[in-house]
Amino acid sequence: MALILHAIKRNKNVFKTLIAAEYSGVQLEFAPDFEFSVSNKTPEFLKMNPLGKFPVLETPDGPVFESNAIARYVARLNGDNALYLSTPIDNARIDQWIDFSTLEIDSNILKLYLPRFGYAPYLPPAEEAANSALKRAFGALNTHLASNTYLVGDSVTLADIITTCNLYLGFTEILVKSFTSEFPHVERYFWTLVNQPNFRKILGQVKQTDVVPPVQSAKKPAQPKESKPKPKDEPKKVAKPEPEKPKEEAEEEAPKPKPKNPLDLLPPSKMILDEWKRLYSNTKTNFREVAIKGFWDMYDPEGYSLWFCDYKYNDENTVSFVTLNKVGGFLQRMDLARKYAFGKMLVIGSQAPFKVKGLWLFRGQEIPQFVIDECYDMELYEWTKVDISDETQKERVNQMIEDYEPFEGEPLLDAKCFK
Ligand SMILES: N[C@@H](CCC(=O)N[C@@H](CS)C(=O)NCC(=O)O)C(=O)O
């Protein structure tokens, strides 16, 4: 008999099992036509879980409820995966972080989430207390992650899956950047994990919420127009029909003219960025003589600036594909700067820990503020402006543009270009 998951598909408690199944190679099926608050209240369902809550996993040996227990079952079903480890102490630590993220993180996120979305009474002092407790838990997690890529050992375990799914609800629904930026290691961990292929396959592209949702009046059915007075300083957001369904579009507003990017207001530059990008892409031979020489002929030190970047946490780059994904994610997030930037990112070394270093060309004399604001990766790097009067720095620029090897004495694992 197949393993049948009774649940809606997009829910962080369900994601735990789906991601664990990706890592452990376990096949699962969803019960057909599962409907929130209907299917989980039938007598058949209540026989599987007397609380009438999902997820429930139907197995050949009977049903299992509680999402952590289901994810553990799936993680252990095929012995040959790394979601649990081989020693009692490592496994105790996996369970420790599972409990920590459930009791200290998830429960406090829910205390913030449920009242604001109309599923529980909204009491400001209770929100205050949950906020402080969550900060305390994030602080502890941040400290652990300052010197650990994963919660336990050197690869993804079930602790990372469950913790990331719990953080997912927070990041996507309630925790804005001003909350999470106090915990840079938690941010880095979360974005690294959600961009792992097995996570991405289940979660899709993850975006942090940019508003603390205003308090909605009690559910259900959803009552989008009857919100309680909104807390000050918080932009409006429409009601949601049920937890964790994809966000509804914000109410339509008259289109406002798009403000001009300040970089478009700079004095014109003789350097045409697209021309440089074309030259870079089209030069197949004699790269030094053609592309590098062409770069310096075109380069306008008044209209553009060059920057070296150096990843601050190279010690954490212990797994090659994770490091490559991290850099790939950074370049994707830089998409917003395509009109104003060119970049090279080198992943350096033949064995872990890999070093990540880069070179960026930005319009203007500073790193554009909108890039700093929008792309959280920027703060993970040390940025140094290139002094082009220094021949050594200029030569380093050349080597980075042309993927010169060995770079600073080491082979390149990869060189990625942003153009
Ligand atoms: N601790 C449980 C929580 C389960 C839970 O709260 N499920 C919600 C959906 S995420 C539910 O079924 N709610 C319906 C209800 O409470 O009647 C788990 O991790 O599985």
Image: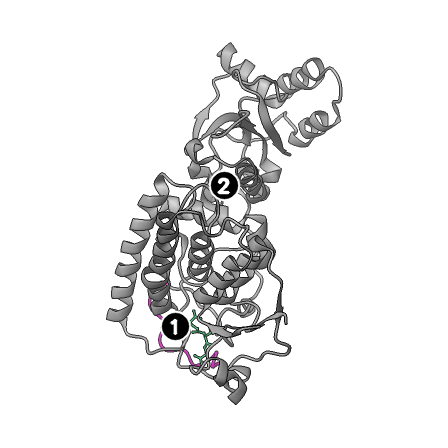
State which quarter of the image contains the C terminus: top right
Q: Quadrant of residue 417?
A: top right
Ligand 1 sits in quadrant: bottom left
Whether residue 273 is situated above or below residue 200 in the rendered picture: above
Instruction: Please tell me whether mark 2 or mark 1 is closer to you in this view.
Output: 1
Image x and y of residue 163, in percent: 42, 56
Amino acid type assigned to the residue bearing label 1 in the image: Leu
Look at the magenta stretch and give its main secondary structure.
loop
Relative to the observer, which residue lies in front, 5 or 413? 5
Residue at image mark 2:
371
Numbered range of the magenta stretch: 221-233
* Count of labels in the image: 2
What's the residue at 53%, 57% (across, down)? Answer: 20
Whether residue 95 is situated above or below residue 184 in the rendered picture: below
Q: Is residue 4 magenta?
A: no
Residue at image mark 1:
114
Taking 252 as reference, is 239 left or right?
A: left
State which quarter of the image contains the N terminus: bottom right
Whether residue 166 is situated above or below residue 224 in the rendered picture: above
Q: How is the image coloured?
A: one colour
